[in-house]
Amino acid sequence: MLVPSWPAYRKVDSQKELKESYRVNGPATELLDDIFGPHFFAIEGAGNILLRYLPEYLQDILEYKAITSTESTELTTLQYEIGQSLENDFVRTSDAGAIKRREDMLGIRADPTTDSLEFRKQRILNRYQMHPPFTRRWLQRQLDRLVGAGMTVVSVDYENRALFITANIDDANVFAEVVHTVETVKPANMVYQHRTSVKDVIGLEERITKQDITWNYKLDGSWKLGEKPFASLGTEEVVK
């Protein structure tokens, strides 16, 4: 696990604003305020943050340097874990472990080798937002968030009780989530049909050609059926 470097702190004037005192603000910094008092620490650099609190005659001793350095590393990890535990309360800022726990609670079987962490977060948010009432406009907004704006079109044939989703989706996992969303929220008496739209470019080219046609038979009784084709086509010539 990569742990960000522990910032060294300096004592600052308690009357200064928080934004002026801290270059980086976060839940862990606020927690330190609660423990040590407001604005007691401010970020200044990196290093052995505990050595300076020892008497000067102990700061040059190798054993004390090693002990405080090790403890500073532990405090670095503690600060990171405290901050991450608070960020795990929100889906957008959760790490992979917290996302896995939410997926287990929702019954989602994710494959980390194929599903990106960002898609897994979006899928969890999609499941959390499935609360009635459901409307066509709600479903359109939901699919726009899940697939992307302009990538899907929701239409309803009320007379035939049919729901149509026209989409251009090339990701199987995203497609499966779209199907799950629609099947979950659509009325039981309505049929869901998926339409695939292909986004492509069609080129048109215009030209004029001529070709001579020779009829081999005349309706005078002189022709023999099957001896020749009814008509012979000449060479095609491009006029324009």
Image (cartoon, rainbow, N blue to C red):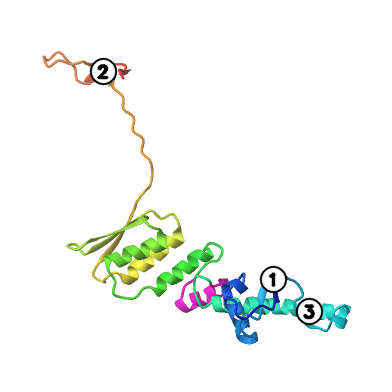
Q: Is residue 48 left or right of residue 208?
A: right
Q: Disc 2 and disc 3: Cα gap in Å?
A: 103 Å
Question: What label does residue 44 carry, if any?
Answer: 1
Could you tell me which residue is drawn at 56 percent across and 63 percent down? 113
| Amino acid at pointer 2 | Ser
Q: Is residue 116 left or right of residue 156?
A: right
**Is 165 within the magenta?**
no
Disc 2 to disc 1: CB gap under 8 Å: no
Q: Which residue is mark 2?
A: 232
Question: Badge 3, how many Cα within 10 Å: few under 14, some, many 20+?
Answer: few
User: Residue 235, position in %: x, y?
Assistant: 31, 16
> Where does the magenta region start and end?
94-109
Q: In this rendering, which labeled residue sits more in front, label 2 or label 3?
A: 3
Q: Earlier in the sequence, mark 1 or mark 3?
A: 1
Of 204 and 77, the residue lying toward us: 77
Of 107 and 26, the residue lying toward us: 26
Q: Where does the C terminus fall, quadrant-wise?
A: top left
